[in-house]
Image (cartoon, rainbow, N blue to C red):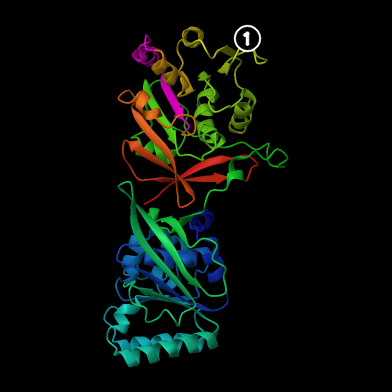
């Protein structure tokens, strides 16, 4: 049983580590030298250890640390112990970081440069390790004069090539270019700000023999694991109609409960940001950057909506940006283990003419007559509440109704807000930027939660403005033939 758990931990670590495509191509080579630059706290050590995880190298490596003891490494990176494993010799030594195998880790904090350099060359000459990581090279090079340093660096490169090994240098000074012309690859890690939010950015400055399609990537150090985020691909939210795995279902999160003061979002990471979930009787404003397709937002909402439907709680959906009932059903179906109870999904469609549509739970109303629209919405809401008196009610709508309220000067927008607060347990208002770039002005001062979908460096993120928190990267998994949204905190 313990072996299965250990194997699961290793697989989980390997799954969480993610390197840019170009860098992954580079580190899979048989031999190379790589320089990782960056100021303190940018994640250089995390990246070097994560490369081991990405390559699944658990034994045949040599890690030289001039800043931290091996015991501290295992303390700051808990996943490392599960990944590297234990040895019989280490288990009998209480000081060997709780029994973890430390034979591949060298504590060089007090070593003289000459003896340390000799130890590195011995590793290369004896071909004991396919990867040698020097963390950091600055601590060794600072004790050498310029001529001796250049000579030693050339010697390391020569022996590395002859041994067919991989050599990774870590440097604390991005401005130091001494090694730049010698190494095969250069990565620079840094931090910058986006609207007062600190984000981490990786620059691919040099990867000899590899075509660099994207020179920079956003990354996270969440849980001490390096994870970069790929650029968004427009086809990522498209449904795989002919997928052989389309019959499989997504595992649902904890279902909404009327006994708690909050309602789970369906996303564990977002629940943490919001302190447990969406507030009961709350109004959530979802705003998007231009160029973000409404189908991506629908894929995000599908998990929230399916949690309501799966627990026999009704959903009132007012389509936005041309979303049809058929498309809603397609995005919800993979999340549900069985057909939902009849009448749980109420869809209100906008149409130039007032008429019934094919689906018996859908109503249409006159787009030019706001009062008739509001009355239709009011009647449908009250009817749904009477039909399901003791259940939670979710309302998903576009910003359109509030826009029409603004145009109708005789109508008080607080009337609709009061209606929603009194009869609806959770309201999600979606504002597509292409539809209405001033959507926030229409609900300013009335919302409880403000979330925004933004694009940074080609990657889509979810930003929590109220309450303020770190970004979450939007990851789209299509392994089952349909889009499954996952959130990854950017730390």
Quarter of the image for residue 42 reads bottom left
Q: Position of residue 64 (x, y in %)?
A: 37, 77
**Residue 166 locus on image (x, y percent):** 50, 78
Relative to 158, say whether 58 is above or below: above
Q: Does 154 lie within the magenta span?
A: no
Q: The residue tagged with tag 1: helix, strand or loop? A: loop
Residue named by callout 1: 355
Indicate whether residue 420 is drawn in magenta: yes
Between 68 and 201, the residue placed more toward the observer is 201
Q: Pinpoint residue 37: horizontal percent, then vertical percent.
A: 37, 70
Taking 119 as reference, is 395 above or below it?
above
Left or right: 479 with respect to 42?
A: right
Residue at 34% x, 56% y is 192
Would you place residue 486 above or below residue 442 in this image? below
Residue drawn at x 55%, y 35% is 299
Rendering coords of residue 390 (x, y %): 45, 12
Q: Does residue 317 appear left or right of residue 265 in this picture? A: right
**Residue 118 seen in render:** no
Task: State how many labels appear.
Answer: 1
Q: Dot 1: few (<14), some (14–19), or many (≥20) neighbours within 10 Å?
A: few
Residue 435 is at least partly visible in this image: yes
Q: What range of the chain is rendered magenta?
A: 409-432
Q: Nearer the viewer, residue 197 or 129?
A: 197
State the image quarter where residue 411 is shown.
top left
User: 443 or 450, which lies in front?
Assistant: 443
């Amino acid at each position: 049983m313990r072996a299965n758990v250990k194997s699961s931990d290793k697989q989980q670590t390997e799954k969480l580590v993610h390197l840019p495509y170009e860098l992954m191509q580079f580190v899979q080579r048989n031999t190379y030298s790589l320089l990782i630059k960056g100021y303190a706290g940018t994640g250089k050590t995390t990246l070097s250890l994560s490369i081991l995880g990405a390559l699944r190298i658990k034994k045949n490596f040599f890690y030289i640390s001039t800043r931290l003891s091996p015991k501290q490494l295992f303390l700051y990176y808990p996943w490392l112990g599960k990944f590297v494993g234990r040895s019989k010799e280490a288990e009998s030594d209480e000081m060997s970081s709780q029994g973890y195998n430390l034979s591949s880790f060298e504590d060089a904090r007090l070593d003289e440069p000459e003896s340390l350099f000799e130890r590195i060359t011995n590793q290369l000459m004896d071909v004991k390790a396919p990867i040698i990581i020097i963390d950091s090279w600055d601590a060794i090079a600072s004790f050498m004069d310029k001529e001796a340093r250049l000579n030693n660096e050339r010697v390391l490169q020569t022996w590395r090539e002859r041994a067919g090994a991989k050599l990774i240098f870590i440097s604390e000074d991005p401005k130091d270019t001494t090694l730049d012309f010698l190494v095969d690859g250069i990565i620079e890690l840094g931090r910058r700000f986006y609207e007062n939010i600190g984000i981490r950015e990786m620059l691919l400055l040099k990867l000899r023999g590899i075509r660099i399609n994207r020179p920079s990537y956003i990354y996270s150090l969440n849980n001490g694991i390096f994870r970069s985020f790929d650029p968004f691909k427009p086809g990522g939210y498209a449904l795989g109609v002919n997928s052989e795995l389309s019959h499989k279902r997504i595992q649902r999160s904890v279902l909404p409960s009327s006994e708690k003061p909050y309602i789970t979002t369906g996303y564990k990471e977002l629940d943490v940001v919001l302190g447990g979930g969406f507030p009961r009787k709350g109004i959530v404003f979802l705003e998007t950057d231009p160029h973000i397709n409404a189908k991506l937002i629908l894929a995000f909402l599908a998990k929230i909506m399916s949690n309501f439907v799966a627990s026999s709680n009704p959903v009132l959906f007012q389509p936005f940006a041309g979303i049809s009932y058929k498309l809603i059903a397609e995005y919800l179906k993979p999340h549900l283990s069985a057909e939902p109870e009849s009448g749980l999904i109420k869809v209100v469609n906008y149409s130039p003419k007032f008429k019934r549509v094919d689906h018996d739970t859908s109503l249409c109303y006159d787009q030019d007559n706001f009062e008739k629209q509001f009355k239709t919405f009011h009647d449908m809401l009250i009817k749904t509440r009477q039909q399901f008196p003791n259940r939670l009610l979710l309302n998903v709508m576009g910003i359109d109704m509030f826009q029409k309220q603004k145009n109708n000067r005789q109508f008080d927008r607080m009337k609709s807000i009061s209606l929603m607060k009194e009869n609806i347990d959770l309201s999600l208002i979606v504002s597509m930027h292409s539809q209405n770039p001033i959507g926030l002005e229409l609900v300013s001062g009335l919302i409880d939660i403000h979330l925004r979908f933004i694009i940074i460096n080609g990657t889509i993120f979810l930003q929590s403005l109220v309450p303020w928190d770190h970004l979450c990267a939007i990851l789209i998994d299509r392994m089952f033939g349909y889009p499954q949204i996952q959130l990854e905190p950017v730390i």
